[in-house]
Amino acid sequence: MKTTLDELQAFVAVVDTGSITAAAEQLELTISATSRTLSRLEEKLQTTLLTRTTRRLELTEEGAAFLQHARTILASVDEAEEQMAARRLRPIGRLRVDAATPFVLHVIVPHLAGFRARFPEVELELNSNEGIIDLIEKRTDVAFRIGVLKDSTLHARSLGTSRVRVLASPGYLKRRGTPTRSAQLAQHDLLGFTQPDSLNDWPLRDDNGNILHITPTIASSSGETLRQMALAGLGIVCLSDFLTREDRRSGRLVQLFARQTLDVRQSVNAVYYRNTTLASRITCFVDYMVEALGKKPFEE
């Protein structure tokens, strides 16, 4: 008998989730049915794909080799189905999106209702990572990147640029005073990033005329965490406009060194691996975000 797609899906689901129980839940099957399907596949192949212990499942060497073929086959089926849906101008399927938490909260989330109304059959999965991930390893369809792109294998579509500014809350400035020269920042609490260290280059000149590099008093990997700390009056911060526009408009955060601030901008791109046929669910999401944000979405 030939291997079926249901058997391939069950095998891949067990590997991805790490257990038959979790795979059964994902596939909306009973645990016994999933276990029988996996056993039937091994009988057909006349080999053991997974070794089972009381605590975990592990791929055998044969299982690891077969997994690659199974993923390729399932991906080909998904692509064929997506092409058929594209012919009907009806994007469909799961879309995995990755971006840093601040971008998800302040840029993507406000436009999700409109996207869902237009493309109800696209199943969105939003993941937040503060660092750079491998799109293939994390099975991500499209990611939004802020700053210089380093992976030349990715296709990038620009969404614009976002200026960075030095900011503080009125409460902090009332308590600690307002610095007027960059050298005075040494006497203040500074909020900065744990990594990459280049994000601690602020758009100011030091006494030697170089770009000011700060050592954070409090550091975080998340721009949203730094924003919240600045709003709480814990220190001075340097963040991108897309994250702080409403805070500045409302006066919750105040820009410092307005005349001295250099025009430093971070590029914002949607990135994805471009195959011969780009999935319609990716195209419709990127196109919608570009349309919704407008020509200069992060400009004042």
Image: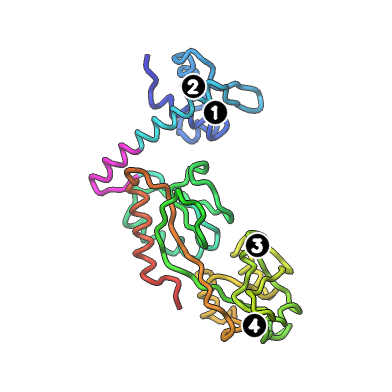
What secondary structure is the stretch in magenta mostly built from?
Answer: helix
Q: CA distance from mark 3 to mark 4?
A: 27 Å
Mark 2 sits on what residue?
38
Residue 127 position (above or below residue 50): below
Q: Amino acid at mark 2?
A: Leu
Q: In terms of secondary structure, where does tag 2 sit?
A: helix
| Residue 59 forms part of the magenta stretch | no
Q: In terms of secondary structure, where does tag 3 sit?
A: helix
Which numbered circle lies on residue 197? 3
Which of disc 1 and disc 2 is earlier in sequence?
Answer: 1
Instruction: State yes or no: discs 2 and 3 in contact (Cβ < 8 Å).
Output: no
Residue 102 position (above or below residue 141): below
Instruction: State yes or no: discs 3 and 4 in contact (Cβ < 8 Å).
Output: no
Which of disc 3 and disc 2 is earlier in sequence?
Answer: 2
Q: Amino acid at mark 4?
A: Pro
Q: CA distance from mark 2 to mark 1?
A: 9 Å
Which numbered circle lies on residue 170? 4
| Residue range (magenta) | 79-92
Q: CA distance from mark 1 to mark 4?
A: 55 Å
Q: Position of residue 293 (x, y in %)?
A: 39, 67
Residue 231 visible to the viewer: no
Q: CA distance from mark 2 to mark 4?
A: 62 Å
